[in-house]
Image (spheres, rainbow, N blue to C red):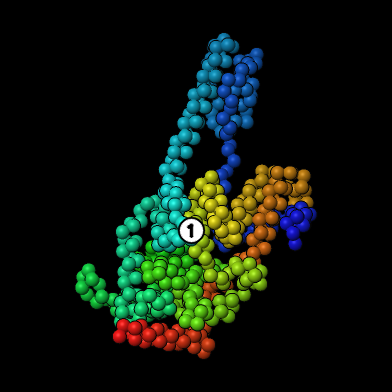
Amino acid sequence: MSALSTSRAIAQVRANYSVFSNDPFAGVQVRIPAPASYQIPPVGTAVVVDPHGLPSSGVGFPGTAEVMAGPQPRLAVGLAPAETARQVMLDADKEREQILGDIYKEALKKEGEIRPYRVALARLLKMDPDKFSLSQAVYEVENAYLDNRLSRERFIRALQVRAGQVRQILKAGGLSAKSSLSVNYAIQQIYEHANAYYDTTDHLTHIVPPLKYSFDDYMGEKDYTNMFASKCLATGSGQCHSLPLVYIMIAEQFGAKAWLSLAPSHSFIQFMDNRGRLLDYETTNGNIVSGSWITGSGYINSKALRNRTYLDTLSKRQLYARCLSDLLLGYLKKFEYDELAAQIRNTIVQVDPSNITVLLVDANLKRSIALREIKAAGMPKPEELSKYPTAFKAFQEMLEADSRVDGVGYQDMPTAAYQEWLTSIEVEKKRLATQKLQQRVKLEARAQRSSFQNKKN
């Protein structure tokens, strides 16, 4: 269906308010500023005084409608009408100055709060989307949410420790750090089981537990930092957002090839074997998985595959856009949708027009605006909404935004369905086909080791 025919179809749809009872797409909350309840009156308008010495409403100072937002200027008793008018004007000016001062203070306060995001965005914009450092981008995104309290040195040190772990695994196995397959194999070891690690700072050998999945608040609803790669590096546990990011950041330290791939409410790793075939690696449980398991959630449709919304390797540029998306989602978690949010959103679109996060944010933004306008219209009956042009237009724009999300094949995956799908990996691990995949990668890694040793000899 063309864009024109879609718009015509939407225009003919009767309003149905039940759409507002649904949860927003992917839990993305987009708050919009509330309409101002007090409008600053124009300065310099002549004041009209009635025979009783009371000013008429709406001329140079708050009238009847505006009094609700603040106290009405007190009138001087016993003054002549002209003096009364001057006193009213002075009182109105003082009240106006107070309001302007409060607005200015509030603006300064917010500017201070969002400054870490302005700085982070400026630094991200200096990066080349096709050659950027993922670890640097992730640091900027997470540090902005933490109000510049994330130590850059500790972040880098934690990442280097994990990379050092992989380097020791490579050395112990006689594998080349220049082989992407070998590096991927070694990285997977720190997700699959505990490993010995010699710490050069204390000169002791430690047994380091594997990076593991945490089911505790894995969507970051109670604590948004549970989604952070920095927290995963610090604690050794994460979820499907942070664990794959850590994997790719480690691979980046070696220049090895590994790609982030998306599924509904989920992300995982794809890497290439010696035959040039892509394999799927699930960081949530440290195992290679089959494509059939990835698609087995039931929430990946043909439109999503056709549009490469899911199960496709993200290019470097798309990965950069995803970092910007994380910046936007973190911002919206703390603040309303404003000019800075719009700037981040527009930057993402310029880099990756197909970015799913932008489509979801747009849909929820239009949803919030539509609901606000319908409430402002007095919640008219759905069949009468067309009589209220502003509200009706907002409702139509919401439907159009929803249609764009549907057009890429997105389907919101309920929490219960996601949990059930995720726990099914235990069954997937025991499948013969999956075990063969795992064994084949090990054999290819050993063959890589033999080749590397022969070259050394």
Front residue of 389 and 401: 401
Q: Residue furthest bottom?
A: 432
Q: Secondary structure at mark 1?
A: loop
Front residue of 136 and 72: 136
Front residue of 38 and 302: 302
Q: Position of residue 78 (x, y in %)?
A: 54, 11
Q: Position of residue 388 (x, y in %)?
A: 74, 44
On the question of residue 395 being in view, the answer is: yes
Left or right of residue 138: residue 67: right
Q: Residue at x 63, y 16 (%)?
A: 49
Examine the rendered structure and indicate whether residue 28 appears above or below residue 456.
above
Q: Position of residue 227 (x, y in %)?
A: 45, 63
Q: Residue at x 41, y 55 (%)?
A: 140
Q: Residue furthest top?
A: 80
Q: Position of residue 452 (x, y in %)?
A: 35, 83
On the question of residue 237 being in view, the answer is: no
Badge 1 density bin: few <14, some 14–19, many ≥20, Cα 10 Å: some
Q: Residue at x 58, y 37 (%)?
A: 37
Q: Residue furthest left?
A: 203
- In the rendered image, which quarter contains the C terminus? bottom left
Q: Amino acid at mark 1?
A: Pro
Q: Residue at x 52, y 79 (%)?
A: 277
- Residue pointed to by mark 1: 129
Q: Tally the numbered discs.
A: 1
Front residue of 83 and 301: 301
Examine the rendered structure and indicate whether residue 393 appears above or below residue 41.
below
- In the rendered image, which quarter contains the N terminus? bottom right
